[in-house]
Amino acid sequence: MTNTSSNRAFVERILAEQGQVDVLINNAGYGEYGPAEEIPMSNVHQQFETNFFGAVELTQMVLPTMRSRAYGRIVNISSIGGYVYTPLGAFYHATKAALQQWSDVLDTEVAQFGIRSVCVNPGGTKSAWSSIAMDNAEKNLLPDSPYAPLLEKVRKGFSRMEKSGGATSADLAKDFYKAATAAKPEMRYYHSLGDRAVVRLAKTHPKLWRRGIDFVLKHL
């Protein structure tokens, strides 16, 4: 995702073998968590290269063949984290917000060619995502960091969310398939009513969302 030559070789191979690209699912992503003050800029760049710029580059590479066939679907795997946020995830959330805005603008440009660009916004999932994010947060913490207590609270919060369950990869695959094949695609796909409700709350009542974060942190 972060290597232009590799991306180009991938697209060229698909075109050579299949002759066309009907659907591109931009699913690569991870959480470069840590204090916004302390994360090295090299890691910030890597977060955007993986979560955002890689998707942009692959999309640019497949759009010409999609336009030539007057059909195509770009499915961008964002997150409810494009709307809601947690401490230590500043740059992860920024990439997901960027992905959504870019996807929406792209859709206004390519719809005239029979191509649609849509987003899938998963919430909590049964995966190693949160443990990887917390490992990164630990690595990004400076010695004697004043943010160390916050990290421990966020870790506890993530642990509780993991125990509460979430969507499996098989569950989300169904969402991806629906987004890729719907005759009249929606701009956003959510896995559950709960995910949709959380986003609506954060968008409509941002102060309430912030107060909720402060409340949870206080009681962890």
Image (cartoon, rainbow, N blue to C red):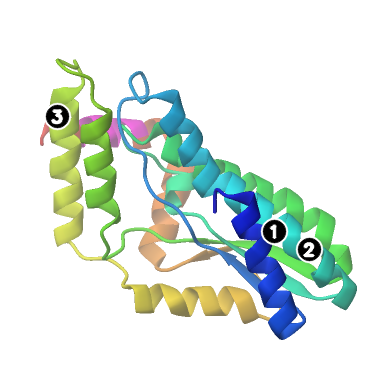
In three-dimensional space, the C-alpha distance between marks 1 and 3, rounded to whole angstroms, equals 43 Å
Q: Nearer the viewer, mark 1 or mark 3?
A: 1
Q: Earlier in the sequence, mark 1 or mark 3?
A: 1
Q: Residues within 10 Å of mark 3 (few under 14, many from 20)?
A: few
Give the residue displayed 40% in from the left and 66% down from the top.
Answer: 193
Left or right: where 186 falls relative to 44: right
Frontmost residue, 215 versus 14: 14
Q: Quadrant of the C terminus?
A: top left
Give the residue displayed 37% in from the left and 45% down from the top.
Answer: 31
CB under 8 Å between callouts 1 and 3?
A: no
In three-dimensional space, the C-alpha distance between marks 2 and 3, rounded to whole angstroms, equals 48 Å
Against 55, residue 211 (above or below) is: above
Q: Which residue is mark 3?
A: 218
Judged from the image, the secondary structure of the residue bearing numbered disc 1 is: helix
Q: Which residue is mark 1?
A: 59
| Residue 212 belongs to magenta span | yes
Q: Nearer the viewer, mark 2 or mark 3?
A: 2
Judged from the image, the secondary structure of the residue bearing numbered disc 2 is: helix
Look at the magenta stretch and give its main secondary structure. Answer: helix
Query: Disc number at residue 201?
Result: none
Q: Which amino acid, by three-letter code, is at mark 2?
A: Leu
What is the x, y in percent for residue 145? 19, 17
Q: Which residues are magenta?
A: 210-216
Q: Earlier in the sequence, mark 2 or mark 3?
A: 2
Frontmost residue, 187 versus 169: 169
Give the residue displayed 74% in from the left and 66% down from the top.
Answer: 116
In three-dimensional space, the C-alpha distance between marks 2 and 1, rounded to whole angstroms, equals 6 Å
Query: Disc number at residue 63?
Result: 2
